[in-house]
Amino acid sequence: AVVSTQSGHYGRDGSLNVEEPENISTEKSLDELTQELGLEKAHCFVWSSLASIMMIQNMVYLLTTVLMPYLSCEWELSGPFETAIASSLSITFCLSGIFLGNLADNYGRKNIIVITSVTHLLCGVLAAFSPNPMVFLLVRTLQGICNGVGGHVCYVLAVEIVGFEYKELSVFVMVFSSQLGGLYLSLMAYFLLNEIGWRYLCAALMVPLLPGLLGLLVVPESPRYLFVKGKTEEGILSLKTLYRWNCRSFPESYSGKNAVKLEKRAEICALFRHGYAKTTIFVTAMFTLNYCIYLTFAAYLPLDSYKSRESTTNVVVGLPKCSNSLNQEALVGTLVALSGDVLGSILAGLAGRKIGRILMLKSLGFLTMLTAISIYFDLNSILKNILNMMVRLGVTGFRQTLFYIAVEAYPTVLRSTSSGFTSCFGEVGAIFGSFMTYSIYPVSPVAVVSLMVDSALIPLL
C-alpha cells in the first residue's frame, strides 16, 4: 500500500501553493515475507531435494578412499598415480571454488545445482566404464570442479528461502545431509562392493541423485537472487509458488520494488581488513588442519586392512587378490568409523551454541587427539572400530563448528565470501593429507598416524 500526503503554504498573494505528493511505501520487505512463510511443506520439499544432492557430493568426495585398493589392484597403479587420483578432486575443488565459486551469483542458484548434479550423474556412469586410470582421473577432476562450483550453493538456496529464525536450522540440515554421504557410501560398499564390483557400484551410488533432480524441476529459483538481479516479476512468481505450497495467501498488490536492499559485494581482501585478519587466518588454518586429518584418516582405514594377519605390526605385505580387495570385516570397520560423521554433525549442531564455539573446538580437538593416539596400538577389533568412530566424530564435529564460526564471526555482506574462502583453502590440507598417506604409508604407517595426531593437537595450542 502507498499513502499519499499533500502539504502546502499560502503565498503573499493569498494563493495556496501545493507541494508534490510524498509517497510513503508500506510494502513488506523480502525478509518479512520469508519470515511469514514459516517452516512448512515448501521448505521440506526444497530441503529434501537439496539433501540428496548434498549427500552425493560428500559421497563422491570420499569415494576413492574406499575404492583405491580395487583401482590399484586392477590397474596396478604406482604410488604417484594413486596420489594423483586421490588428490585430484581436492585440487580441482580448491581451484574451482576460488575462481569459479561465484557462478551461482551470475547464473542462478538452481541452474548451477542442476548442471553440477547432472554432471555428477554422468561422471558416475563414466567412472563405471573407465577403460583406464587416465579416464578415471578425468572423472575425478570433473567431480572436483562440480563440488567447487556447486558444493556451497545448496547451503545458499536452503538459507535464502527461510526466515531469520530458521537459517541455522537450514544450515544444520544441509550439513547433516552431507555427512550422511559417508555413511551411505560405507553401507553400499558393505552390501554391494564385493558382490557386483567397484564399477557397478560407482553407477549404483548415483541413484539418490535422480529424485533430487526431479524435485529441482519444480523447485523455484531463490527469490532473493531474482530480486537482487532485478528480475522482479520472476521473484514475485517464485514467492507465490512457495506461499501456495504452504497454503498461505500472498499479497496480490505486492510490487517487489523495495524487496531487498542492495549491498555492495564483498571482495576477498575485505576478509583481511577492519579487524578480521586474525579471525580469517585462524579459521583458514584450522580448516586446513581439519581437512588434512579428515582425508588422511579416511584413506588410512582401507590401507590399514592390508596389514599382515599373522603379524601384529603395521607393515604392508602386498595387496590381496582383486576379486576381494577388502573383506567384509574391513568394510564393517569403515561403516562404523564413517557413522561418526553423522554423530559429530549432530553434536556440533546441538551443543556448540550452548557451550560456545571455541570450547567446542578445543573439546573435539582433544577428543580427536586421544582417540587417534590409540591407533598406534594393536587393539581388539570392536574397540578399534569404536575408537575410529570417535576420531571421525571429533574431526567432523570440529569442521562443522568451524563452518558456524566462519558465518557468525563476520557481517552479513562477508559471510558467503568468508565461508567459501576458508573452506576452499582447507582443501590444501586434504591435498597434503592424500599425498602423504599414499606416499609414506607403505614405508611407515606410524608416520601417517603421527600426521593425524599432530593435526588434532595443534588447534589445542
Image: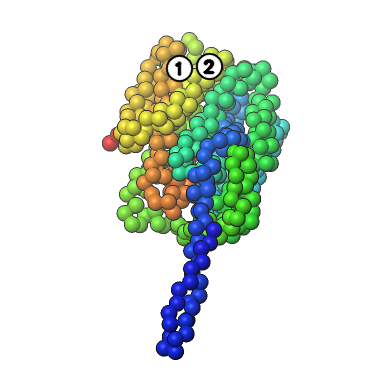
Distance Cα–Cα, label 1 vs label 2:
8 Å
Choose top left, top right, bottom left or bottom right for residue 61.
top right
Q: Position of residue 236 (x, y in %)?
A: 61, 52
Q: Residue at x 33, y 57 (%)?
A: 274
**Which residue matches tag 2?**
332
The vertical placement of 155 against 192, above or below, is below
Q: Are marks 1 and 2 in contact (CB under 8 Å)?
A: yes
Q: Secondary structure at mark 1?
A: helix
Q: Position of residue 404 (x, y in %)?
A: 41, 40
Where's the C terminus, which quadrant? top left
Q: Residue furthest bottom?
A: 13
Q: Position of residue 319 (x, y in %)?
A: 56, 21
**Which residue matches tag 1?**
385
Where's the N terminus, which quadrant? bottom right
Count all numbered tags in the image, as a single digit: 2
The first of marks 1 and 2 along the sequence is 2
Q: Secondary structure at mark 2?
A: helix
